[in-house]
Amino acid sequence: MARTTIKDIARECGVSLSTVSLVLNNNPRISESTREKVLSSVRKHEYQPNTFARSLASQSSRSLSVIVPHLNHVFADTYFGEIVSGIYEHATSLGYKVMLEMANRHFIQTHEYLNLLKTKRVDGLLILGSSVHDEYLKDLAASNYPYVLVNHYFPGRSMNYISADYITSARLAANHLLDHGHRHIGMLSGTTTNTALDFRDHFTKACMEGGVAKENLYWSDGWFTEQGGFEGAQWLLDRYPEMTAIMAGNDKMAIGAMRHIARRGLKVPHDISVIGMDDVAAAEFANPSLTTIRHDLYQIGAKSVEALLVLFRKEAELVQQTLPVELVVRESTGPVRTAS
């Protein structure tokens, strides 16, 4: 008879591997109803944790490393700030310290990302803002060290990640604009992440399935910034004045686009609807307030910590998870303008 594993317990109880682990370690964060459900399954199957694996896991530095991209003022960026807040608060609640590292040239050339793990200075790496050009990630993919890509993934590669659901995000955004009658739609996105490319491809597909001609879908690189959104909107409107809506791949580009639209003497959403993605704090207070696809960045950070600890304790060999998203309708989108 096959030995019951922690995966069997988690599957039977309908909870995550990390939840079962927290129950077994008597963590007070778990509700009594969940605790009793898990313990009942443990007793039923006479489950015995792998004491050898747990003893190895106990050789812990109680520290995690957060690797951020080499960007100007990266720590002031709202997107990264929300994720790091989720990581820090969840990690410290579990008794872990958090180290911040920047993926600059020296960090990569000296293989410091591997040295941190080899010397056991940290139990694992949480990698934010990775791009399609980050070749050093192949070293981690080929290793047995615990790491998690935070809100990014590489399709077709067996790499650990926790990410918002960008495919569902694309369909929610497309359907919202289609429902308002928009058939000439511009897109602002970046090209350096697989999530952005995935979003652009699936947004395009959903629009075409909804009856939009391919030639009526316009694209510009917005560089993920407010300035990029401003310049991208200008480029699109100069060439496609018939455009009635802009889908931006993040809220910063959307806010930049709205700034250019206002500078041009047009009104949002009367002349052009604008929708963003992420739902950062500034979205609600933009003028007009920004319709967006909500990605719970704080929760993505917290869930990434849980996934990393599951990998560190060798309770899973691979973690790949997408988190739910939500359309938040505000003032920046409306029905397509009618000809005057």
Image (cartoon, rainbow, N blue to C red):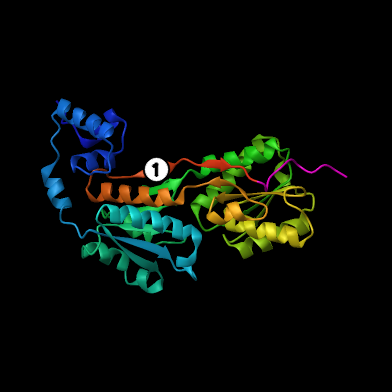
**Residue placed most toward the observer, 307 or 293:** 293
From the image, which quarter does the C terminus lie in? top right
**Do we see residue 235 in this rendering?**
no
Q: Residue at x 36, y 55 (%)?
A: 87
Q: Is residue 226 left or right of residue 29?
A: right
Does residue 227 sit above or below 320 in this rendering? below
* Residue position marked by numbered label 1 in the rendering: 321
Q: Quadrant of residue 50?
A: top left
Predominant SS of the magenta segment: loop
Start-end of magenta stretch: 331-340
Total numbered badges shown on the rendered structure = 1
Q: Residue at x 31, y 48 (%)?
A: 306
Position in image of residue 175 (x %, y %): 63, 37
**Residue placed most toward the observer, 51 or 284:** 284
Q: Is residue 259 left or right of residue 252?
A: right
Name of the residue lying farthest toward the bottom = 106
Position in image of residue 201 (x %, y %): 58, 45
Position in image of residue 29 (x %, y %): 27, 43
Q: Residues within 10 Å of mark 1 (few under 14, many from 20)?
A: some
Whether residue 260 is in magenta: the answer is no
Position in image of residue 185 (x %, y %): 70, 47
Does residue 250 sit above or below 1 in this rendering? below
Task: Please name the amino acid that badge 1 sits on.
Answer: Gln
Q: Residue at x 39, y 43 (%)?
A: 321
From the image, which quarter does the N terminus lie in? top left
